[in-house]
Each structure stands twice: as C-alpha cells, then as structure tokens.
Amino acid sequence: MAGFLQQVVEGLGAGAIYAGLALALVLIYQFTGIVNFAQGELAMFSTYLAWQLTAAGLPFWLALVVTLVVSFAGGMLIERVIIRPVEGAPELTVVIVTVGLFIFVNAAAGWIWSFTIKDFPNPFPEGAFRAGGVSVGYSTLGILGVVAVVMGLLYLLFQHTKIGLGMRAVASSPQSARLVGIRVGWTLALGWGLAATVGAVSGVLVAPLLFLDPNLMGGVLIYAFAAATLGGFDSPLGAVVGGLVVGVAETLAGAYVGFIGSDLKIGVPLVIILGVLLLRPQGLFGRAVVERV
Amino acid sequence: MSELVVTDLVAGYGDAKVLHGLSLTVGPGEICAILGPNGAGKTTLLRALSGMVRGRGSVRLGGTELTGRSPDAIARRGVAHVPEGRGTFMPLTVEENLRLGAYVRRGRTGVEADLDRIYTYFPALKPRLRQAAGSLSGGEQQMLAIGRALMLRPRLLLLDEPSLGLAPLVTRELFRIVRAINEQERTTVVVVEQNAHLALGIAQQAHVLETGRIVLSGTAERIRADEQVAQSYLGYRV
Ligand SMILES: Nc1ncnc2c1ncn2[C@@H]1O[C@H](COP(=O)(O)OP(=O)(O)O)[C@@H](O)[C@H]1O
Ligand SMILES: [Mg+2]
C-alpha cells in the first residue's frame, strides 16, 4: 500500500509540471482556438533566460521574477508580430506558423546557449517529508504548491477582475466583445503573455529535475497535450486536473504494468489522447461545441 | 441639429457592395425604424454604424465622425449595438453580461445603480443574475441584450430585429419597454424590424430599405397610413 501511495505521490509531482504547461496551452486555445505547438519551446527559452540570470549572479527568486516579466512581454510581442498577421487564416496556416516558431525558438536557444546540457539550480530544499512510510520530496511539495498558486492567481484574475471578465468575454464571443468596447486584439495578446508566463513557470519547475538543454520541453509537451485533451482544451481547471491524472497514470503504468517500464511510458499520454478523442472529444471539463443556427 | 447624420454610406462585404450610398438623419431622442424585406441590407446598415463592417461616406454622431473607427472605439463614443442573434455571452452569468455592457465606462460609480435600473425595466432578469446567460429563454436573452446595451448609457442604441423568434406577447412587451427607455433616458434609437406594425407603433421616423437603397422615408404615421406603401413594401394591409 505504501509503495502504491509513493507512486501516486511521484505521479502527482510529475503531473503538476504537465499541468503547468497544459495550463499555458489552454490559456491560448481559449481565446484564439489556436493550439500553440511552440508553447514548450517558449517555456524552454524562458528557462534559459532564468539560468542566464542566475549564472550572472542574480539570486534565484529575483531571476525568476525578471524571467516571468520578460516572458509575459515576449508572449505579447509574439502575438502582435507573428500571430496577428495569420489571425483568421485557415487552421492549418496557424498550425504551421506555431510549428515554425517551435523550430525557430529551438534553434535560437541552441545557437545562443549551445546544445550542451546545463545544471539548473533547484529552488527547493533537498530532502523529504515522511509520513506513514511514504516520503514526499520537498521539491515535489514545492512544485505542487507553485502550480496551486498559479491556478489560484489565474482564478482571481478571471473571476474577480475587470480585465479577467473582458478576457472571458473575448473567449466566449469576440464579435460581441468588440461591440461592448473591448479591445479584442490586445486581449488576445494578453492571453499569449499570460500563457508564456505560466509556461515559463513550468519550465523553471522541470529544469532542475532534468537537465537544461534546448530539448527540455519536448517530452513535457506531449504530456501537456494529453493533459489538456483529457481536461478539455477550453478549461483551465481541466488542464490542471488532467495534468495530475496523466502524471499519476504514467507513473503507475511504469511501475505496475510489466511491459511498459520506463521506456514505454511515453506511450501513456498517446493512449490517453486517443482514448479521450474517441470517447469524449471535449474532455472531462470542456464544453461540447454546439453550433447554434 | 440631428444627433445621427449618415451621408452617402457605401458598405458591404469584401467586393460585394450591399449599401449603395445611403443617407438619413435621426434627431436627438428620436426612434427611427428601418423597414424592408429580407436581404435589403438593414443588418448591414447597423453593422456599418457600429463599425463591424467598414463603410465609405460619412457617419456622424453628435458631430463626431465615426467612419473608419473600430467597433470598440465607436462603443466608447456611446453607440450600443444589439446585434442580430443578440450577441449573448452564453457561458457567462446574466450579471456578468450586464457588467460587460459597462466595460468601457470609467470608474464604478453609477454601475451598481444602473444594474438596479435595468432590473426595474426587466424584472425577469433579477432572479437569474447568477445563472448562465445561455440558460435563458429567447425573450429573456433579448431583454438581457438590451439591458447590456443600456449599461453603456448609450447616446445611440441600435436594435436589430428584437422580435425575431419571440412570441407576439413577449414582443409587444419588449417594444413597450424600448419605448419607455427612450422616453426616460432620452436615448436615440435606430430599430430594424421585420414586424413593421410594431416598429411604426413606437417610431417617429421610418425608412424603407430595398436592395441597399432607401426607397421611402417619412414620419411613422404617414408610412403607416399609406395603404399602398403598406402593401407594396411592408407586405401587410392596414
Ligand atoms: N457576413 C456576410 N458576408 C457576405 N455577405 C453578407 C453577409 N451578411 C449579409 N450579407 C449579404 O448582404 C445582403 C444584405 O444582408 P443583410 O444586411 O443581412 O439584410 P437584412 O438584415 O435586411 O435581411 C444580403 O444579400 C446578404 O446575403
Ligand atoms: Mg437582418
């Protein structure tokens, strides 16, 4: 039993990271209907920025704050400069633009920081909290705590601020949002900025567990896709729940399903994506798309 | 002086022109009815007034040129457009829909009082404040849409077929309220309606549109009284 619980705890820790990146994906999808394939790479780039700042001697938390601010501005800028021109273009065009952005950001990081791996400082203390035969690493607790805080802040933003209300209005109907005087273009940019910030958090959380290299987020992105698909691409809460479920499912499958082990674990998110698309395409928390005529 | 002055307005979608040089004026505090058959360009006219479609020519509100401005800029100048289909924010609550109507107003002063004012016009909305707007009936959604528009404290209220899809009793009630709003707030109103009888009942001026041109203008009374007009353009006998 303790062994099982231990696996669940590990799964939750991994899942919180997927949840973070899934949240970033959902933030953009909600407003624009765009699946941003470059989300993971943007997070990786932000993580390099944080690394560069700490390497230059900045204290970790200060480096983090600077990174988040720069990521926010960068996200907005990308929307204004790269996405805006293809707004309203066929879906495939937009997909290709975000895939292009993926490749570009990846190459740029390699060019600036080289492809050799780097050690990323762990902001959380070593060691673990033990209870009843289960040990919970402080870093797992820290990751779960950070994702909970991010979720809480987003909730406050969306439910209790005027800007948040405007953002939800745009997500619901851009045309009507325009008619009540909301600057829809800026709201979309704001969504990209927020997504880049949340993505940066997930990158900074995952980097100490793996090593920092330009392909840091490639694997995480697949899990994040599974999380967002499971939770529903238009539901931030769904993204978080989906992330945690995917994390636990992956860990349990690796531990208990003989032939999967650690090599085939990457199959778990793919199975989840397929299963959800077949059984409940809108995800657990998503709204089914009904066309009203 | 007229509140709304439209001069030689040309508008359409892409290369397809729908309005071919349309001119009209509406006095301050007046209700102006736009009548005409399906496809005449009534909706397009309202869209051009609120900036949803680009137009050439001139649209002036209280002396300010609106042509070429974006919809959000026009909303900030006091134009509230209740679009065809009502434009409800379905997943948001009724109260959130109403508050969005006041989005561009500065400060919170007056917003709470205006919410109360909306509930006196539309008491049916009050018990449904926390409900998703998408769960309202058609009539309630139309009330919500008008309430949302009023939250802007508009200079000019544009209504696109408020009666569409509603039961006759609900429609009559709705038009009575629009009239009351116009009288109490002195809001200038342009209302597009298929139901000519109802629209002429509350309007002072009316224009009949056909294929993007005004084919007839006059006081509502005159147009209502003109039997031949009624038959040829409005499709009913008085
Ligand atoms: N979004 C649109 N794109 C292209 N053509 C349109 C669009 N909306 C309306 N039209 C065309 O413009 C003309 C006028 O339509 P509309 O303004 O909706 O008329 P009405 O409201 O009087 O029924 C019609 O021929 C219609 O087919
Ligand atoms: Mg119409």
Image (cartoon, rainbow, N blue to C red):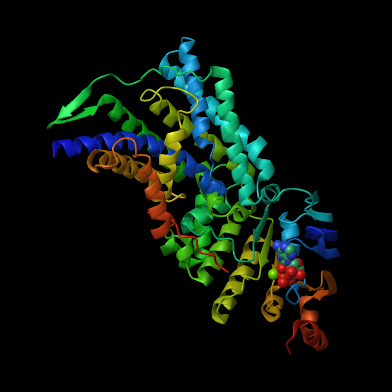
Identify the residue at the far front of this view.
A259
Quarter assignment of residue B13:
bottom right
The quarter of the image holding the N terminus of chain A is: top left
Q: Position of residue B34 (x, y in %)?
A: 75, 71
Identify the residue at the far top of this view.
A57
Q: Residue at x 46, y 44 (%)?
A: A158
Depth check, front residue: A116 or B4: A116
Q: Position of residue B107 (x, y in %)?
A: 56, 42
Relative height, residue A127 to residue B227 (above, below): above
Depth check, front residue: A149 or B123: A149
Q: Residue at x 45, y 14 (%)?
A: A54
Left or right, A198 with reference to A149: right
Q: Quadrant of ligand 1?
A: bottom right
Left or right, A262 with reference to A25: left
Left or right, B33 with reference to A56: right
Quarter assignment of residue A83:
top right
Q: Residue at x 56, y 46 (%)?
A: A34
Q: Residue at x 75, y 48 (%)?
A: B69
